[in-house]
Image (cartoon, rainbow, N blue to C red):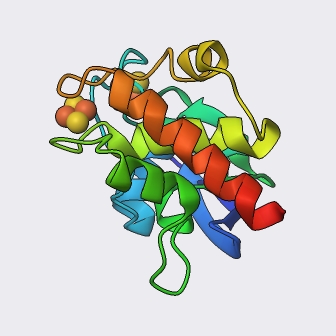
Amino acid sequence: MPKRLLSLVLNGQPHAGAAPDNMLLLDYLREVVGLTGTKTGCDGGECGACTVLVDDKPRLSCLTLANTCDGKRIDTVEALARGGRMAAIQRGFHEKLGAQCGYCTPGLIMASEGLLRHNAAPTVDEIREALGSNICRCTGYVKIIEAVQYAAELLREEAA
Ligand code: FES
Ligand code: FES
């Protein structure tokens, strides 16, 4: 299949590439660009492991064609740490023990990051709703919710 040129802002940097029309964003990120932080789980829109941000909104990259993202901003989990320092949401998952095997964690982190970019003080119900498409087989969800609440506190402290 012929490829089309693709122009993105990927993790804050201009990115030019090419993808066939049937290539998923998940495969483009992992196999073409080499950003393997985004995980393949169910490969069918059921688990949330593949969540990235498209123009600051969470999107399942296993259900998104790469070429539909032309001209958009894409953030993957690799975008978050800066200068060796974890982002607030990464600290939340780390310090509040929001991960065990960690396979679901990049997707949960990006879904949470998408929430926190629009809502500085989410309620428990808002967090549950924002993470409703993300499945974790290990932790239960209490620690994950605590992780997001803690990250929101850190962000508010940074902004104060
Ligand atoms: S891999 Fe995309 S939702 Fe499961
Ligand atoms: S930490 Fe293992 S699936 Fe979530």
Which residue occupies the foreground of this view, 139 or 6?
A: 139
Q: Residue furthest bottom?
A: 83
Q: Quadrant of residue 91?
A: bottom left
Horizontal side of 79 relative to 71 (left or right) equals left
Query: Is any part of residue 104 visible from this angle?
Result: yes
Q: Residue at x 23, y 45 (%)?
A: 102
Does residue 15 lie above or below 135 as drawn?
below
Which residue occupies the foreground of this view, 139 or 109?
A: 139
Q: Residue at x 28, y 44 (%)?
A: 97
Horizontal side of 159 relative to 49 (left or right) equals right
Does residue 82 lie above or below 72 as drawn?
below
Residue 160 lies, in percent from the top left, at 84, 63
Count of residue discs: 0
Which residue occupies the foreground of this view, 121 or 52?
A: 121
Horizontal side of 63 relative to 115 (left or right) equals left
Ligand 2 quarter of the rendering: top left
Residue 55 lies, in percent from the top left, at 77, 46
Q: Residue at x 39, y 48 (%)?
A: 93
Query: Is any part of residue 23 visible from this angle?
Result: no
